[in-house]
Amino acid sequence: MIDKVFVPPIKCQGIKTKLVHTISGIVSQVQYNRWVEPFFGSGVVGFNTRPNKAIFCDSNPHIIKFYSALKEGIITPKKAMFFLEEEGKKLEKNDGEYYYTVRNRFNEKGDSFDFLFLNRACFNGMMRFNRKGGFNVPFCKKPNRFAQSYITKITNQIKHIQEIINEREYSFVCQPFQETLSSLMPTDLIYCDPPYIGRHVDYFDSWSESDEFDLHRLLVNSGAKFILSTWHSNDYRKNQYIETLWKNLNVMTRKHFYHVGGSEDNRNPVLEALITNFDASIKEIPGMDITPKQDQRVHQYAHKQRLLTI
Ligand SMILES: C[S@@+](CC[C@H](N)C(=O)[O-])C[C@H]1O[C@@H](n2cnc3c(N)ncnc32)[C@H](O)[C@@H]1O
């Protein structure tokens, strides 16, 4: 189990910071050789679980480029600090308009320092790309965004994550999940956190029913152990795939409140599901139901929440 959760420097929708303890509690019960994470996002789960050996993948090239640059020392805490100080001054000088200069520059050249700048100065910490793959999130409207205390916080996040990467055997690969899951070993542990089906769509982050079916097939046929994050239900609806596609697996649920994201959908409480193909016997944490084989407790909980079935 881990004591302190390290927050990574890049934020994204669906970041699992609040679920890290629960997930690491499940992971601590399992013997494995290599950690495989096909939907890396911010990396908060893998970086905090801290396996010795891991392959971290994502279809978003900017995320992978950023962490590869961190691994190779192209990005360092010092360089990031100077960059944010310089660019932060320009942002403050012209009342925030400079954000759009950096956004245009990033959409032309895809530089990782610009990616960091935009990720930490955009509206609600969102990561969204248009149909041409251009970052299109507006400014957070705080011209003094990069105050010294905020830069120090980001710099420390980079320092911690870089230390974690440097001490271990990690690779970062930009590829679709089908490729990541096509070269597995039985001793791997896979942690999957795909875009939530039926929730949102974006250039690097869309998800269809056929993706969900592909993921199910590749995971159950892999011969490796896996943990899948998905949503169970919210105040209005229920994830129907839990009781159909994923029905023969172990399902645990936990309430979670998302803080990243612009839409109501992303900022409301959600009952998260953690699905495994092995028996996870973690101690009950307040606010968490443990429901091997989807026993009655999920349904009782769902009733208490007055959930509607779609
Ligand atoms: C919900 S986020 C993962 C969040 C991450 N677990 C965290 O805590 O920050 C889903 C990620 O999957 C990536 N993704 C979406 N579709 C993908 C695909 N077909 N193949 C690989 N990655 C994909 C997105 O770019 C996004 O970073």
Image (cartoon, grey):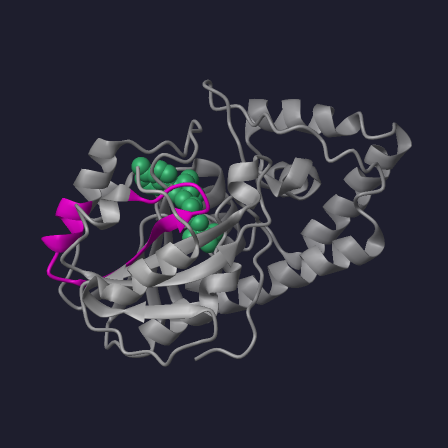
Q: Which residues are magenta?
A: 216-239
Is residue 102 something one can see in this rendering? Answer: yes
Q: Residue at x 17, y 60 (%)?
A: 249
Is residue 190 something one can see in this rendering? Answer: no
Is 150 on the left-hand or right-hand side of 117? right
In the image, residue 235 lies in the stretch drawn in magenta: yes
Depicted 186 relative to depicted 101: above or below: below
Is 36 on the left-hand or right-hand side of 87? left
Front-lying residue, 51 or 266: 266
- Tell me which image quadrant ligand 1 sits in: top left
Q: Residue 164: x percent and y percent?
A: 50, 68
In the image, residue 194 lies in the stretch drawn in magenta: no
Q: Residue 13: x percent and y percent?
A: 51, 43
Q: Residue 37: x percent and y percent?
A: 33, 55
Front-lying residue, 36 or 226: 226
Is 113 on the left-hand or right-hand side of 51? right
Q: Residue 262: x percent and y percent?
A: 60, 36
Q: Residue at x 63, y 61 (%)?
A: 157
Residue that protrudes farthest toward the right in the picture: 93
Q: Residue at x 31, y 49 (%)?
A: 38
Depicted 118 relative to depicted 45: above or below: above
Residue that protrudes farthest toward the top in the picture: 132
